[in-house]
Amino acid sequence: MVDNLEYNKDNIKYIVELQKTELSQSLKYASYIQKALLPTENALEFLLPEHILIYLPRDIVGGDFYWVSKKGNLVFIAIADCTGHGVPGAFLSILGITFLHQIIDRYDCNSAANVLNVLRESFMKSLNQTGSEKEQKDGIDMAFCILDRETNILQYAGAFNPFYIIKNGNQLIEIAGNKMPIGIAADNEISFTNHIVNLDKGDMIYLFTDGFVDQFGGPLGKKFKYRPFRNLFLNICKLPMEDQKTSLLKTLNDWKKELPQLDDILIFGFRY
């Protein structure tokens, strides 16, 4: 009887470990698929030669994604944070990337706000979002830009996520996104706001999700927050891209130390 009990315990342990291994392998394979949908480093280098990218999913797969594309003389840039992280967030990120490709291919995308409006409708339709109290309020927070190098104009529209531009190495301008997601919102739907920024040579643009600023750490175990985040960009904006990346990662690691990463972290910046 005892031997049989021990056998059963060992058998259950073996099954659990096998399932854990299979799940881990499946997630790793899923991460390859997700990464294959993201722009390659060569594509980023071609479209935005002076850029910085920090992409740190909390889990093997993540809900944050970055997307860059080109059509004519326009460069499109999206930095996004999907509801949740891990597998649910990864599913939504694939939807977001797919819809962005379709929108850029099919429509005359002369307005960043219009792209977000169409993306919202596509997202809501695909998830059958009607505003019912019982349905899941899944969505995407996003900073979306259209860069026109011929006119030196950058358009920005945001779903919660803000936009930073630093001029002359010391003037940080923040433009806030609309307080509504790509997806169903609590209030009546309105158009996203289209912001137009005139760029000068040497301007630094930063787009990001909230994983860095919401990370707990420091001597009191509190969130990093936005004011130190803005000051960090002001301190590093004149540095070469690789040095900026090194500084951001060092600051993050020094801040959180042994505390776990709470969310996906994504920062994308480029010098005009």
Image (cartoon, rainbow, N blue to C red):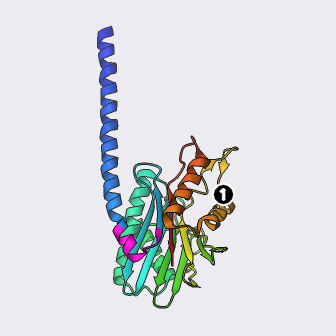
Q: Is residue 164 left or right of residue 1?
A: right
Residue 118 against residue 223 in the figure, above or below: below
Q: Is residue 116 left or right of residue 254?
A: left
| Along the line of sight, the residue nearer the viewer: 89 or 78 | 78
Q: Is residue 270 visible?
A: yes
Tag count? 1
> Magenta segment, which residues?
42-51
Residue 54 against residue 43 in the figure, above or below: above
Give residue 175's position: percent from left, percent from top.
62, 75
Residue shown at the point (56%, 52%) measured from the top left: 250
Residue shown at the point (54%, 48%) measured from the top left: 262
Residue 91 against residue 221 in the figure, above or below: below
Give residue 23's position: percent from left, percent from top.
33, 42
The majority secondary structure of the magenta stretch comes to helix
Residue 115 against residue 253 in the figure, above or below: below
Is residue 29 covered in magenta? no
| Along the line of sight, the residue nearer the viewer: 149 or 142 | 149
Is residue 48 covered in magenta? yes
Three-letter amino acid code at disc 1?
Lys
